[in-house]
Image (cartoon, helix red, strand yellow):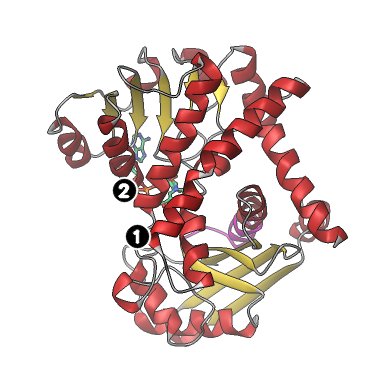
Amino acid sequence: MHFVEFMQLNGHQELAVWTDPAVGLKAFIAIHDTTLGPSMGGTRIWPHATDDDAIMDVLRLSKAMTYKSAAAGLPFGGGKGLVVANPRTDKTEAMFHSYGRFVETLNGRYVTTEDVGATAQEMEWISHETQHVLGLPESLGGSGNPAVVTGYGVFQAMRACAVAQWGDDSLEGKTIAVQGFGNVANSLAGYLRDAGAKLVVTDIYEAARARAAALPGVEVVGPDAIYDVVADVFAPCALGGVLNEETIARLQVPIVCGAANNQLQDEEADAERLRSRGIIYAPDYIVNAGGVINVASEYAGPYDRAAAMAKTGEIFDTTTAVIQRSRDEGITTAKAANDIAEQRIEAGRAK
Ligand code: NAD
């Protein structure tokens, strides 16, 4: 499908393109919807092979941000930025100054922050050219690394799933299978261990597996074995697309609840597969909203970590509401989450 047709079908408002050959920059910004506030979403740095791939990626990601912020009750619409570059080898200060000027041309309709491939350093460079950037280092009054807050939100969503599945929020003695042991998983693991849970962890990187193995009460398995672990919760905290026909059939857990974005390879079909197996799936964008809630606190200013944590705690209630709605209406949790987000946007539009 051509991207203009895709935009019309999905209700996108705007797609902006910026090139600056002098600094080797090609970038796109997609604004999906600004009904609830300025469009907000990170800038991804990724070397897409074709412009079409890059544009479809930024369009899809911007729409997901509209739903994530609406469901979390934040005054933001959905947007996303994409710098077409290799984050390991191509990033330069001049490139991000130029990108900051691109963000500035949108006059605050788009507010950026970090995403895959970006760090607080690039946000600082962008901030030299525009004020519409969040996720600055704490030393500059920003909200710093969001993973700590995101991990707390995943823990709260897991408690809500426990209530829905077992009638009790306690995770004591429960076994949690964690896929990927990066920033968010490290934060989550701290909360889980404090709650008395047992962890089975995997990562594709030996160093990350070694870090996990050094923790008391943590078992480490190979990357592919994680799907077969008999556990109480499967927590995808690595990449997207990990839940599909093949992996869902292997799962030996009653709950899936983790931080990774876009966990379902096919949103409708895979959510239905999980539901028909009696597995509670906590929708990813509900679970991992701690990151955007954290930058929302920076946007409101001054950044307040305690307030961000308190608002992230509400992920417990949102997850509960999503599961309840899916049960009441006999629909998947993915559909229930989308319906809640769409209702909020409609209500905002009616104002
Ligand atoms: P990270 O890069 O720190 O950690 C990801 C880890 O997953 C890495 O250690 C990597 O080696 C591992 N990994 C990659 N592929 C794997 C595989 N196939 N099997 C096992 N391990 C694998 O990233 P993060 O910041 O911890 O984020 C984790 C996920 O949560 C991502 O999907 C991210 O988009 C999402 N997320 C993060 C935040 C945040 O605040 N950082 C917020 C919202 C969503």
Q: Quadrant of ligand 1?
A: top left
Residue 57 sits in quarter: bottom right
Asked whether 137 or 311 is in front, the reply is 311
Asked whether residue 259 is in view, the answer is: no
Instruction: Please state which amino acid type lies under the numbered disc 2.
Output: Asn
Image check: 71 left or right of 315? right
Image check: 180 left or right of 71? left
For ligand 1, tell me if the residue under mark 2 lies within 8 Å.
Answer: yes
Task: Give the main secondary structure, helix, strand or loop, of the magenta stretch.
Answer: helix
Q: Residue at x 64, y 53 (%)?
A: 73
Query: Label 2: few (<14), some or many (≥20) within 10 Å?
Result: some
Is residue 54 located in the magenta-colored stretch of the structure? yes
Instruction: Please state which amino acid type lies under the numbered disc 1.
Output: Asn
Q: CA distance from mark 1 to mark 2?
A: 9 Å
For ligand 1, tell me if the residue under mark 1 lies within 8 Å.
Answer: yes
- Counting from the top left corner in percent of width and height, residue 316 is at 52, 37
- Helix, strand or loop under label 2: helix
Q: Residue at x 67, y 26 (%)?
A: 324
Asked whether 252 or 164 is in front, the reply is 164
Residue at numbered disc 1: 145
User: Looking at the picture, does residue 168 appear above or below residue 211?
Assistant: above
- Counting from the top left corner in percent of width and height, residue 185 is at 33, 40
- Residue at the limit of the structure toward the right, as seen here: 350
Is residue 87 located in the magenta-colored stretch of the structure? no
Q: Which residues are magenta?
A: 47-59
Residue at numbered disc 2: 183
